[in-house]
Image (tube, rainbow, N blue to C red):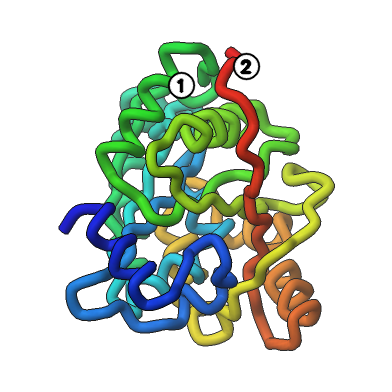
Amino acid sequence: MSTTTRREFLRAGAVSLATVPLSALAKNPAPTAQPLRIVAVGAHPDDPESGCGGTLKKFSAAGHNVTVLYLTRGEAGIAGQTAAQAAATRTAEAESACGLLGAHARFFGQIDGVTVFDQAAVARMTQALTDLQPDLVLAHWPIDSHPDHQVAATLVIQARLRAAPPFELFFFEVCAGQQTMTFRPTDYVDITDMQEVKRAAVFCHASQNPAEIYAEGGHTLMEQFRGAECGVRAAEAFVRFTARGTTGLV
């Protein structure tokens, strides 16, 4: 069913995605013939899982269609392995993680550590998201210490400004204070019931020493802190993108 038809359905029911909190969208069961299309865009395998894995699982469990689009295959992410070896390992890990989250894994084709933001990359991201026809996209917060995260975020922002019709865009955080900076949430999703499956999805990335990273990255503490902010045990936080802006930046 086309995106236009789905959005016409939402309008007919007096529902606008632009005015519905992300928490409400994530917990509502999908109408039988009208599931939302959700796309999470992450720079590397394990980024979407750690930043919004609980939310993705809530969407898939509610019957919505979920895709994870990885900018790279993590080619530079395993010491002692060639780029091809690391890519094969991390691709398999990403596919396993997506299986737990009820998501489809897709790969954009850039290279870990040398990601590119230019006109051609913007056009490719715009086309990739046009092909996926998302109602809702979750992406990295752009103010981040990791250059690949910055590129992933900015490509999605530019694709959003070019999209017709535009999709709703929310940013997630990863390793707050170490990578994600100056993040002020506008939306929260209660992931109390999905915390364990999110952890299991992160731990699919065995090559990344997940036990150490989960502790050092403060994932559990971050989930508890965001939960305390919104009155639940564990939550993921997001910033809603509302700008219309200009497409003449690159």
- Pick whichever of labels 1 and 2 is earlier in the sequence: 1
Q: Is residue 245 above or below residue 39?
A: above
- 39 on left or right of 30: right
Q: Which residue is mark 1?
A: 122
Q: Quadrant of residue 61?
A: bottom left
- Mark 2 residue element: loop
Q: Which residue is mark 2?
A: 249
Instruction: Residue at 46%, 21% (x, y): give it.
Output: 122
What amino acid type is highlighted by mark number 2? Leu
Give the label, 1 or 2, closer to the camera. 2
Given residues 198 and 104, the one toward you in this image is: 104
Is residue 100 something one can see in this rendering? no
Q: Alpha-carbon distance for marks 1 and 2?
A: 11 Å
Q: Nearer the viewer, residue 91 or 105?
A: 105
Q: Residues within 10 Å of mark 2 (few under 14, many from 20)?
A: few
Judging depth in this view, the residue of 93 and 134 nearest the camera is: 134
The three-letter code of the residue at mark 1 reads Val
